[in-house]
Every structure is written in C-alpha cells, then in structure tokens.
Amino acid sequence: MAEGNNKEGSKLGRLRSAAKQQNGKLYIIKKCIAMLDLRRQPKSKMNTKGHQHY
C-alpha cells in the first residue's frame, strides 16, 4: 500500500507542478495584455478628451 500512496503522491505532485506552470503562463499573458491595453489607452483618451462636457 505504501507504494500505491507514493505513486498517487507523485501523480499529485506532477499535477500541482503543471497547475503552477499554467498559472505562471496565464500571469505572463495577463501582464502582456495589460501592457498592450495601456499602450492603446492614451490615444483613446486623447480622442475623447475634447468631446467631454462638464
């Protein structure tokens, strides 16, 4: 039984590692999208700035 638990533990460890790796990739993608969004933002602000009424 100890051997079976070791295999399950190893499998769980691999799954956790894969999940952490995927989470890291998603973090990088989110940061890239945020950076692209920030690069685009000033143009849209400039275009709407003159049309705002207070």
Image (tube, grey):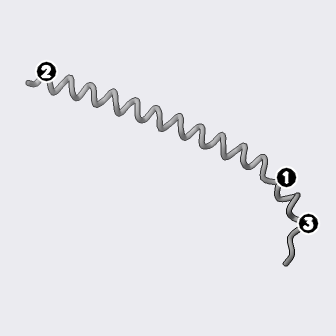
**In the picture provided, is 23 more to the left or to the right than 30?**
left
State the quadrant of the C terminus. bottom right
Q: CA distance from mark 2 to mark 1?
A: 62 Å
3 vs 2, front mark: 3
Q: Secondary structure at mark 2?
A: helix
Q: Compute the Cα span from label 3 to label 2.
A: 71 Å
Q: Residues within 10 Å of mark 1 (few under 14, many from 20)?
A: few
Kindly state the secondary structure of the residue where label 1 is placed.
helix
Q: Is the N terminus in the top left, top right, bottom left or bottom right quadrant?
A: top left
Q: Which mark is residue 54?
A: none
Which residue corresponds to the image point at 77% horizontal and 46% vertical from the top-left? 39
Against 17, residue 33 (above or below) is below
Mark 3 packing: few (<14 Cα in 10 Å), some, or many (20+)? Answer: few
Location of residue 31 in the rendering, given as x and y in whole percent from the top left corner: 62, 43
Q: Which residue is mark 1?
A: 43
Q: Which residue is mark 3?
A: 50
Q: Percent x, y for residue 26?
A: 53, 38
In front: 53, or 20?
53
Quarter of the image for residue 27 reads top right
Identified by mark 3, the residue type is Gly
What amino acid is at disc 1? Lys
In this view, which residue lies farthest toward the left? Answer: 1
In the displayed structure, would residue 10 be above or below residue 29? above
Q: Earlier in the sequence, mark 3 or mark 2?
A: 2
At 83% across and 59% down in the image, what residue appears?
Answer: 45
Res 3 label: 2
Q: Quadrant of residue 52?
A: bottom right
Q: CA distance from mark 1 to mark 3?
A: 12 Å
Query: Which structural element holds mark 3?
Result: loop
